[in-house]
Image (cartoon, rainbow, N blue to C red):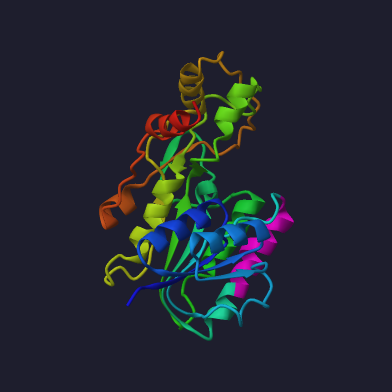
Amino acid sequence: MSSKITIIGCGYLGSALAEVCIGKGWQVSALTRNSETATKLRNMGVTLVVESRIENEDWHTQLDPNQDFVVNCVGASSSDTDGYITSYVEGQDSVMTWLENGNVGTFLFTSSSSVYPQTGKRFVDETASSAGVSEKAGLLLAAEQKCFPPVPSIGRSFILRLAGLYGPGRHLLIDKIKAGEELSGNSDRILNLIHRDDAVNAIVTCLVSEDTNIGRIYNVSDGNHATRGQIVSWIAENLNSGEAIFKEDDDENTPNRKVSNNRILDELSWFPKFSSYQSGYQSILEKHS
């Protein structure tokens, strides 16, 4: 019997996850607020697609809360604080209410490495303090806290704190360099990255991990720890473009840290296919050359 998974929030990451799960023969259901995305998911072969906003409750009776896996990878409905409250805090409340009437083997929530406010290029792992985070990062933490302990109907919960997501169709740096735009921020700030396909693989790795893993927080990054200047210079050289200029206008409290991925490497034997920005961006440049 194939596994059943519901993916909540099928944007850039969730849609790619749905495609991989279909390829594995799993029965996939999805929730999305975007009608165009809903059409793409149906054409992809998603069994059931419900169009609604996560913070609402009208979808609770349309999606079966009895699943092997539930993944909440919703993105903020807007980039302001209200968007974070609606999608992450109220959204997570809505999901947990839905799951009270079901039975789920594994629940997974995709958070962000933005919950680490450290500066000075320090290494941070999952035990690092989040004291002093930005308001929006604090809302992500609030959403995380709703996962542990999970509601009784959930067997175990994972939180994946994703580094900066990039990949096919999402390559802002390439676009800015091509356009000759001046880049905001400092060139020597560390840019922690994860390719979309590696993020999807990390999600699936957690879902199918042995039952002895009762649920964890994992950082998901490529572990490369290059500076923004190094990455941009490499892209510009491969585009045969002029050197990009940074505004060098970061606030002194702007997070500047190296996100460790050692825990997921050690405990789940997960390893990124694109373990450097060079390999990740090269695959994108080849498709857009």
Q: Position of residue 113 (x, y in %)?
A: 50, 48
259 to 108, vertically: above or below: above
In the displayed image of the protein, which residue is found farthest to the front? 43
Report the span colored magenta.
80-94
Name the residue located 54 percent from the left edge and 70 percent from the top edge. 146
Assess whether residue 85 is covered by the magenta stretch: yes
Quadrant of the frame with the N terminus? bottom left
23, 5: nearer the viewer: 23
Does the image show residue 24?
yes
Location of residue 258 with respect to 108 vertically, above or below: above
Pick the residue in front: 93 or 25. Answer: 25
Indicate left or right for 258 with 169 as reference. left
Question: In percent of the image, x 49 and y 84: which residue is there?
Answer: 102
Relative image position of residue 30 (x, y in whole percent):
54, 67
The answer to whether 187 appears left or right of 91 in the picture is left
Residue 34 visible, this orientation:
no
- Who is closer to the viewer here, 112 or 236? 236
**Measuring 36% from the left and 47% from the top, which residue is drawn there?**
261
Figure check: 6 above or below 136: below
Residue 79 horizontal/vertical position (percent): 69, 49
Horizontal arrangement in the rendering, residue 74 relative to residue 55 (left or right): left
- Residue 196 coordinates in the image, percent (x, y): 46, 46
On screen, residue 159 versus residue 173, left or right, reads left
Q: Of 30 and 279, which appears nearest the observer?
A: 30
Does the magenta-highlighted stretch encompass residue 31?
A: no
Magenta stretch, main secondary structure class:
helix
